[in-house]
Image: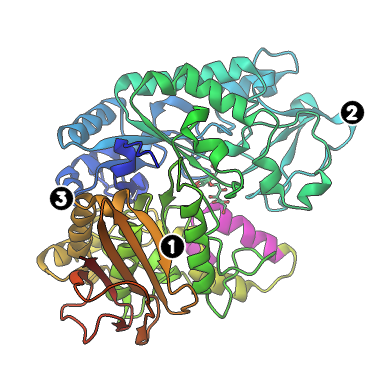
Amino acid sequence: MTLDKKWWKEAVVYQIYPRSFKDSDADGVGDLKGIISKLDYIKSLGIDVVWLNPIFASPNDDNGYDISDYQDIMREFGTMDDFDALLKGMHERGIKVVLDLVVNHSSDEHEWFKQSRSSRTNKYRDYYHWWPSEKGKPAKRYSFFDVNNDAWKYDSLTKSYYLHYFSVKQPDLNWENKALREEIYKMMRYWFDKGIDGFRMDVIPFISKDTTYPELPAQYEGDFVAYYANGPFLHEYLKEMNEQVLSKYDVMSVAEGAGVSTASAMDFVDADRKELNMLYHFDGVSLGYLPGEFKTPDPNGYNLLAFKEIYSRWDSIFAEKGWGTIYLGNHDQPRMVTRWGNDSPDFRELSSKMLTTFLMTMRATPYYYFGDELGMSNIKFDNIEDYRDIESINMYKQTQEKKGDLKKFIENQKISARDNGRTPFQWDNSANAGFTTGNPWLKINPNYLNVNVAAEEKDPNSVLNYFKKIVKFRKNEPALIYGKYTLLDKSNPDVYAYIREFEGKKMLVLLNFKAKAASATIADIDLSKAKLVMNNYIEEGKSLLDLRPYEAKIYELK
Ligand code: TEU
């Protein structure tokens, strides 16, 4: 295997949700000046890249994923001068900055859409997807956020329907229109010329549409997401984007790979295809939900054997070329310790460290979500009134309209809702966890009194200090970055065991995913000279292959 070394393969990416990181002007919403005030904290983590969720002008129907001006900063977040200062501050600390490219759709308050909907002959009409009503209702398309999951909205001004895969205020942009694509490339160059280091590309697999809008083809059998991710000219557009923009800069690109499988992933990230560098998949984070239900956790929890199969399969496709990503949390996910670990008082810290060990020892670029380094957990709202996320609010309305079980809906959302991962960052045990002196836009987890930066910086055995330690360990250990991954003890239902090896060096990773003692079975590997180099327990355990609840161990094998 030829080793195609790249900085973005060796990086640890830290995702900041600006709305919830730090508020500097007491409006209860995080902002860029707030991030600037915490640059030294970010530096202290030892990470290399910061991914900021959308900071652009937006009415915030979907918290910034509905952009009304791609070259202006969201009013609540500050000004372009603030952004320039933030970028400078990050670069001075050797940290790269990746922004969020949301170009499958814009806000309906974008000037382009205002023009487009004003008349059927407006020059911006074909920047979006329209269906004239005299042709009847167009074929069903699924909308993630519409109360009726209907992706066509009738607009009386021109007696036409427009397409919106997400909320009604997020009309889909028409990438089949070259003039629109040129506008997007121009905007990307604007940000790259300012010095940003890459883009995370929001649902980029969805951008190409068959503009005859046929009925869902039979081979997709109700699987709209897979259909959306297989538009007719998707890869032509990504190649064009690379040729016209990405290839001109030393930058990274990562696709949010909704609808992308191991069968299609290389179409996006095979370097020979000159499209994108990386993508993140949804196979892992979808595990443990009941099929066909809205984000309904399986009462039996998730199956570790399936978890191991998914992450091993995604490693295997990049064995020779391409490159993977690894994450367990982001702004669309609940907190990883609640979803994948155990947020009870006995196990929250141990299982946070165990999950972090997994993320930092796989052969993929880790995308680590802010707050997980503290072991922040789900807030588990009891009332729909506490939610701010359009997805939770509209799906609750849908359940109400369908006379569904609202109590069950709320119970499910305690585990799976996106707002669980969006509660304000917990800085200290002062009012509002030090996030704001105003009224926070979203409630703060009451556990901030002991789960916070100030407390954990002082505790050598905190989740935070473990995070810093293992990030540093990974960055100094090429075997954990480029090393070959081999799954061990495949059928073990409790322990995830694997080897990472590079240039003769072997690292054994043992992770107990359960709240009980468990043992690994490892044959054909000489463990006689194994040296423990990382452990999430303070005291070393009694034997190498026996693990205590949620124990994570890394051994260097001579
Ligand atoms: O997410 C789109 C997406 O497909 C998944 O995140 C998921 O299906 C969605 O969150 C509904 O559960 C991206 C952004 O990450 C998300 O925050 C936005 O709401 C969405 O696109 C629209 O821009």
Mark closer to the chain start, 2 or 1 = 2
Is 415 left, or right, of 375 in this rendering? Answer: right
Mark 3: secondary structure = helix
Mark closer to the chain start, 1 or 3 = 3
Residue 444 shows in this picture = no
Is 372 left, or right, of 37 in this rendering? Answer: right
Label 2 beta carbon within 8 A of ligand 1: no
Mark 2: secondary structure = helix
Residue 167 position (above or below residue 81): below
Residue 77 shows in this picture = yes
In magenta stretch: residue 387: yes
Mark closer to the chain start, 2 or 3 = 3
**Which residue, given by chain and number where applicable, does mark 1 sit on?**
420
The part of the chain drawn in magenta is: 383-400
Q: Which mark is residue 134?
A: 2
Q: Are marks 1 and 3 in contact (CB under 8 Å)?
A: no
The Cα–Cα distance between marks 1 and 3, rounded to whole angstroms, is 25 Å
Rendering coords of residue 147 (x, y %): 68, 53
Label 1 beta carbon within 8 A of ligand 1: no
Q: Are marks 2 and 1 in contact (CB under 8 Å)?
A: no
Near-viewer residue (234 or 309): 309
**Which residue, given by chain and number where applicable, does mark 3 sit on?**
44
**Residue type at numbered disc 1:** Asn
Rendering coords of residue 132 (x, y %): 82, 27
Q: Are marks 2 and 3 in contact (CB under 8 Å)?
A: no
